Amino acid sequence: MEDYMDNSELIRSALLSRENAYCPYSGYAVGAALLCADGTVYGGCNIENAAFTPGNCAERTAIFRAVSDGNRSFLRIAIVGGKKGQKPDSYAFPCGVCRQVMAEFVNPKTFKIIVATSPEDYKEYTLGELLPESFGPENLE
Ligand code: THU
């Protein structure tokens, strides 16, 4: 199942989505690529707004695209970020809100978060490593 796409390929997809980032206020462009269990990849970019708070992160753009498409079974997400117009030079970790949104849909022990600067340079974590002791749907059962 997990072999649809290797990490480097998923990162390349995130880099492509990053080109669509709309970030005139921060100048920080982020791209994400979410691999689903059926092999579908949903890309996302950050989308900012003149009123600031309506802006959305790349990760949530990708996740919301998938969920609105009826796809809620996720394997991995690759994330790339850096100054607009430049190649990423450090890892862009998902913000707390995006980690919480991931926790709604995935098993924290198996879902992988890949932060990358290029297809060759990346680190991989589970959601559980980045969001330990989380509050999730099971708390409301
Ligand atoms: N951003 C993301 O897209 N993902 C993250 O995980 C961190 C931050 C975006 C939000 C905003 O458009 C810009 O990066 C600067 O914070």
Image: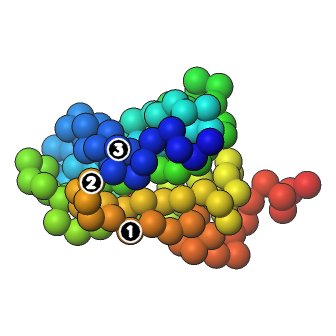
Outermost front residue:
3
Q: Position of residue 80 (x, y in %)?
A: 29, 54
Classify the position of ligand 1 by quadrant: top left, top right, bottom left or bottom right.
bottom left
Question: How many other residues sit within 10 Å of disc 1, few (<14), some (14-19) or many (≥20)?
Answer: few
Q: Is residue 61 visible?
A: no
Q: Which residue is mark 1?
A: 123
Outermost left residue:
85
Q: Position of residue 4 (x, y in %)?
A: 51, 38
Outermost top residue:
69
Instruction: Give the mark, 1 or 3, whose residue is nearer the N terminus.
Output: 3
Q: Quadrant of the N terminus?
A: top right
- Which residue is located at x 56 percent, y 66 percent? 126
Outermost right residue:
141
Secondary structure at numbered mark 2: loop
> How is the protein colored in the picture?
rainbow
- Which residue is located at x 8 percent, y 48 percent? 85
- Which residue is located at x 52 percent, y 30 percent? 40
Task: Name the residue type under label 2.
Answer: Pro
Q: Which residue is mark 2?
A: 119
Dots 1, 3 in contact, CB < 8 A: no
Task: Name the residue type under label 3.
Answer: Glu
Q: Which residue is mark 3?
A: 9
Q: Position of residue 8 (x, y in %)?
A: 33, 50
Q: In this rendering, would 18 be left or right of 97? A: left
Q: CA distance from mark 2 to mark 1?
A: 11 Å
Instruction: Give the mark, 3 or 2, whose residue is nearer the N terminus.
Output: 3
Dots 3, 2 in contact, CB < 8 A: yes
